[in-house]
Image (spheres, grey):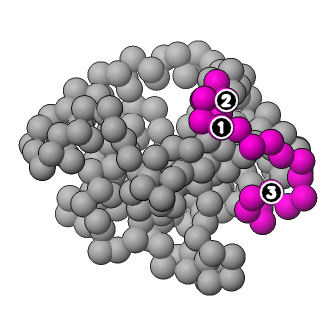
Amino acid sequence: MHELFGDAPSTRLDLQAYLDDFEKRFWQIDDTGFWKLERLQYYDETGVPSWDAFRAGDWDEALRLIDAMEAGYEQERPQLEAAGIRLHRVRVVEEPVEPYIRWELKVLAARHRHVDDVAVLPADRVSEIEAVHGHLPELIVLGTDCAYQIHFTADGKLDGATRTTSATAITRIRAFIQDLHRQAEEITSYMDRQDF
């Protein structure tokens, strides 16, 4: 478990237990919001049609399918707004940008237009932290209810999570992600500047 969790009590959840736990807790998020930190440069998104097209080398079809995903994000927004849930995400990006990240940023930009406050942070901005503590973990904070360190296999498949419900750890982890978010660049601006 990452240092951000400190000595907080925690529970290791296998994949299905994590998915069930997340689903149960998500709609209970309070006004502190949902905060996510993504650090890995590749996730296995098997089953997402746009990712499957990307993996098959059909970039135009991958983009078309991302456009099609926007309708779903637009439909999701009223439900999130009614529940008072705000979504915030920091995406750490190594440069030069790898093909997978180019694809994922297109998806995140679509989410940003409808449901997510997405900001991009170049990896060199966290190099000093990582020199001491290693790569940043994958983190999610659900309001004041819980925080997860998300686990992945070596080939990028989701592999469950470690959960803490310690108020002290949740506050510390949320503050850490929020600080990175303040240092990051709004995704549309980043993508315009990178010209993709």
Marks 1 and 2 close (CB-CB < 8 Å): yes
**53 or 89, nearer to the observer:** 53
Residue 145 lies, in percent from the top left, at: 79, 34
Q: Secondary structure at mark 1?
A: loop
Q: Vertically, is 68 above or below 161?
A: above
Could you tell me which residue is drawn at 25 percent across and 32 percent down? 49
Residue where numbered disc 3 is placed: 5
**72 or 7, nearer to the observer:** 7
Q: Vertically, is 96 above or below 99?
A: below
Three-letter code for the amino acid on which mark 1 is drawn:
Asp
**188 or 63, nearer to the observer:** 63
Residue where numbered disc 1 is placed: 14
**142 or 192, nearer to the observer:** 142
Q: Which residues fall within the magenta stretch?
A: 1-20
Identify the disc placed on residue 17: 2
- Hey, which quadrant is residue 24 in on the image? top right
Q: Disc 1 or 3, which lies upstream in sequence?
A: 3
The 10 Å Cα crowd at callout 1, few under 14, some 14 to 19, many 20 or more, is: some
Could you tell me which residue is drawn at 35 percent across and 21 percent down? 72
Q: Secondary structure at mark 2?
A: helix
Residue 147 lies, in percent from the top left, at: 73, 44
| Badge nearest the viewer, 1 or 3 | 1
- Residue 47 visible in the current orientation: yes
Marks 1 and 3 close (CB-CB < 8 Å): no
The mark total stands at 3
Q: Disc 3 or 2, which lies upstream in sequence?
A: 3
Q: Quadrant of the C terminus?
A: bottom left
